[in-house]
Amino acid sequence: MKILYFAWLRARTGRAEEEVAPPPEVATVGELLQWLRGLSPGHGEALADLSVVRVAVNQEFAKPETPVAAGDEVALFPPVTGGGGRGSEP
Amino acid sequence: MIRVQREDFDAGAELAALTAGRTDIGGVAAFVGLVRDFVEPGAGERPAAIRAMTLEHYPGMTEKAIAGIEAEAMARWPLRAVTIIHRYGRLEPGDRIVLVACAAAHREDALHACAFLIDWLKTKAPFWKLEDTGDGTRWVRAREADDLRAQRWEKG
């Protein structure tokens, strides 16, 4: 399974992408996020507040209950900010 | 027509291309988004000037997401043609970021579809902005006001 990180999630995990092989009991996006948290202190920090993390599975927006499987491309990113706008890092 | 590109675009040329050779179009509504040189501070934040902004996106998903948003607009309004161009990479104040142009037989459809498209692009296309204020950089947070603007187009 390929995990992609964008924006500050990339900065905090220290990587743009990685291959992972979660155990079989990790079957949904929600379970995957919990499992990724334990991979390293950086992952734990990046995924500390899941209310500001959005997920896409195979390039489609996903929900916590969306299934994941080996071979999927799973992207983790903050809420999107296209067009124009402002704000600050959470 | 959808393009996601680093390069600038010529809005006039794009509008001309949108209607070239067509006689069934009664109006074109267009929106051009630019990089501002200031931010309005939120609660507890200092005002800041913007020196530059870097737009990151998710190649592959970006194009798919925009195509999905365009298809939704085509389903809701009888549009003759649509152009959406969204830039990425490093941009400076005054630079163009995005063009949305909708052509329809009647102005009402073109105007509504244009407003819908930019509202949904802001909240449903995978772009992220890194602002450079001169004191450092920070990732732009999604705005609740943008979410509310996008939600007014939700059905049901």
Image: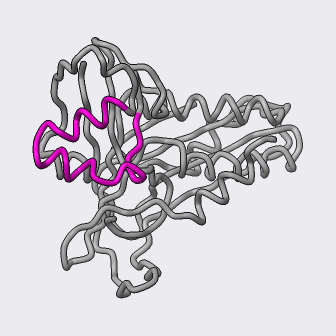
Looking at the rendering, which quadrant does residue A33 occupy? top left
Q: Classify residue B26 as left or right of residue B8.
A: right
Q: Nearer the viewer, residue A14 or B137?
A: A14
Q: Identify the main secondary structure in magenta.
A: helix
Q: From this viewpoint, which residue is outermost toward the front?
A: A25
Residue depicted at x 87% and y 49%: B108
Q: Position of residue B35 (x, y in %)?
A: 43, 66
Q: Nearer the viewer, residue B8 or A5?
A: A5
Q: Position of residue A45 (x, y in %)?
A: 20, 53
**Bounds of the magenta segment:** A31-55
Residue depicted at x 75% and y 40%: B103
Residue depicted at x 34% and y 54%: A49
Q: Position of residue B95 (x, y in %)?
A: 40, 62
Looking at the rendering, which quadrant does residue B22 occupy? top right
Q: Is residue A28 magenta?
A: no
Q: Classify residue B99 as left or right of residue A9.
A: right
